[in-house]
Image (cartoon, helix red, strand yellow):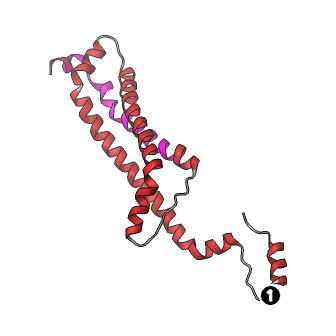
Amino acid sequence: STVPQSKIEEYSAEFSQAKITDLRAYVLQTFGDTLNQLNVVKWLTILAASFMACLIASLFLRMLIAKDRTQIAIMKNIGFCANDITTQYITKTLFVLVAGIILGTLLCNVFGEVFVSGLAGMMGAPSINFTIHPLEVYLLYPLIPIGITAATTILNCRPIKKNTTTTEMFE
């Protein structure tokens, strides 16, 4: 926590030879530019990862939908509408994604700090301690790929609505 200005003035008067500084102000002065750069790198990494997730999901879904053309046509013929088929694809992709997010989070919590400390140790940093912000790590960051994958799935399932069932059956 930050020290009130009155305490800083009190200690400055009592210990005139010492310089009394608020810890937050000291950290901001010392590491401010580095922390700002790391924040920019964090958001650029999130943007790049989001783009890659969108690209990979899009390519995978296009391949899967092309492979499942006849099954989609059969489902349409027995009464499923395009929204039902889209919901099925969303469910499949999000199930795999959520399982991957849970597994990745567990592995990072168990091995992440040890792995990064080992790599940083080779470069001269004796230890690295992670500071986890629970809302960001366990809520915001998982919601980003979930939202991107759901939106990508919906966009890639649009051709299902346009295809006619009889032409798909005989191709």
Q: Name the main secondary structure of what is drawn in magenta.
A: helix
Q: Residue at x 82, y 73 (%)?
A: 7
Q: In this view, does 21 lie to the left or right of 34?
A: right
Q: Quadrant of residue 149?
A: top left
Q: Left or right of 16: which side holds 99?
A: left
Residue at the limit of the structure toward the bottom, as seen here: 17
Q: Which residue is drawn at 25% across and 19% down?
A: 71
Q: In this view, does 29 lie to the left or right of 151?
A: right
Q: In which quarter of the image is the C terminus?
A: top left
Q: Give the range drawn in magenta.
A: 140-168
Report which residue position mark 1 lands on: 16
Q: What element carries label 1?
A: loop
Relative horizontal placement of residue 11, taking residue 131 as reference (left or right): right
**Residue 150 visible in the shown view:** no
- The answer to whether residue 156 is magenta is yes
Q: Is residue 17 above or below residue 4?
A: below
Mark 1: amino acid: Ser
Location of residue 135 with respect to 72 vertically, above or below: below
Q: Residue 156 location in percent, x, y? A: 33, 35
Q: Which of 138 and 130 is in front in this view?
A: 130
Residue 56, percent from left and from top: 31, 43
Q: What residue is shown at x 62% (from left), y 76% (from top)?
A: 29
